Image (cartoon, rainbow, N blue to C red):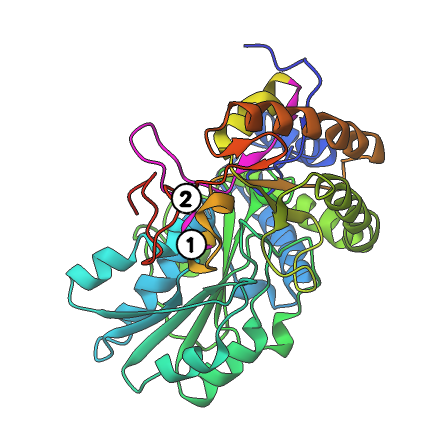
Amino acid sequence: MSYEKKLIYFDNNATTVTAPEVAEAMRPFFGPGYGNPSSMYPLGGEAAAEIRKAREKVAALLGCEPREVIFTSCGTESDNTAIWSALRTQPERRHIVTSRVEHPAVMNNVPLLRKLGYQVTEVGVDEKGDLLWDQFLEALTPDTALAAFLWANNETGTIFPVEKMAEACAERGILFHTDAVQVAGKMPIDLSKTKIDLLALSGHKLHAPKGIGVLYLRRGVKFSPFMVGGHQESGRRGGTENVPYIVGLGRACELALERLDDENSRVRALRDRLEAGLTAVPYTRINGNPANRVPNTTNISFEYIEGEAILLHLAAAGICASSGSACTSGSLEPSHVLRAMGVPFTAAHGSIRLSLSVYNTAEEVDYVIRAFPPIIAKLREMSPFWKGDGPAEDNSMLTCETGACQVCNT
């Protein structure tokens, strides 16, 4: 398959291109630098030295000590490690607190935890996706082993007040974990000034390759390894270290730190320009809190049409984006995040997430702004819920008094 065709890539919350500088840093370790870092001879020692350097670069981005950085395979492994370590090191505690808008890496642990006899409280959010603070505090009990929350939502970009949440947990002797996958490289982080105990990071969300992640473990926090094996990572994560990918992640973190100002100025301005252009289309709405988001993300609903149909037309125009709905061939169930926010079904089904990076340009933004209106107009002409220049008078199939949707039967 050829990937040479030029694309407008606006799906950077899903994955990012590997930075050329990162690929170049990794290259020697696919060749002459192939040594096992556990080996005693110089070839192994050189690999171990490069891991130490990479650990220092990750620590600099996170504002923590290098020894608090554990290399993993991805954000999902880091999240799972945090959850199960907290439970194994506190067997007397049988309660976890999380939210209704989590990434599947945390959310899909909930049914398993309940099956194993743990209690799980899922805190709600308001219509902008902001955490219901009082509900969060009420959920914390003496039996709570861990509170696990996204720092920034992967669909809407809305930010949770994790520093404040961690302080509330610390006052009650509760461990706090945050998934910072969508924050690292987009916002300044200084873990040394917080009470956060554990944090997950994923390399491929900040221009490192897929297959490498980090778990931050605050010094002094009890820990039980998820991956049991050799002595690697100071006995905290077994398995021979993935040297080229660790080196690549270190370089990516170094670049991310250098580009934080660009991310929070130029990229933010591009996102705002894109959002202003797209919301000029009638019957659109922004999902999330415009005043409390990461700088690269917008989630926009185009009412009375399906997000998947929009994506197909965008793809034909060379534009990569993602839908806020989790539709499958057998179900039209919209995003759990948008449902938790109370977004109307007429809007939730037509939600699109666009997420930018430092590699995007104003020319690309303008191209996308021009491409959207005819696509939306065409799809609305085909929609049974649209007539002429506005919604059909009878859209009773879409809502009912109970809030259920008769189209998706939810």
The residue located at (50%, 74%) in the rendering is: 219
The residue located at (34%, 52%) in the rendering is: 400
Q: Is residue 20 above or below residue 56?
A: above
Q: Nearer the viewer, residue 336 or 146?
A: 336
Q: Amino acid at mark 1?
A: Arg
Mark 2: few/some/many CA within 10 Å (<14, 14-19, 20+): many
The residue located at (37%, 58%) in the rendering is: 81
Mark 2 or mark 1: name the one nearer the start of the chain: 2
- Please tell me whether residue 331 belongs to the stretch shown in magenta: yes
Dot 1: what SS?
Answer: helix
Q: Nearer the viewer, residue 179 or 390?
A: 390
Q: Amino acid at mark 2?
A: Pro
- Please tell me whether residue 281 belongs to the stretch shown in magenta: no
Dot 2: what SS?
Answer: loop
Residue 334, label in figure? 2
The residue located at (33%, 27%) in the rendering is: 329
Of all residues, the one furthest to the front in this rendering is 393
Q: Quadrant of residue 225?
A: bottom left
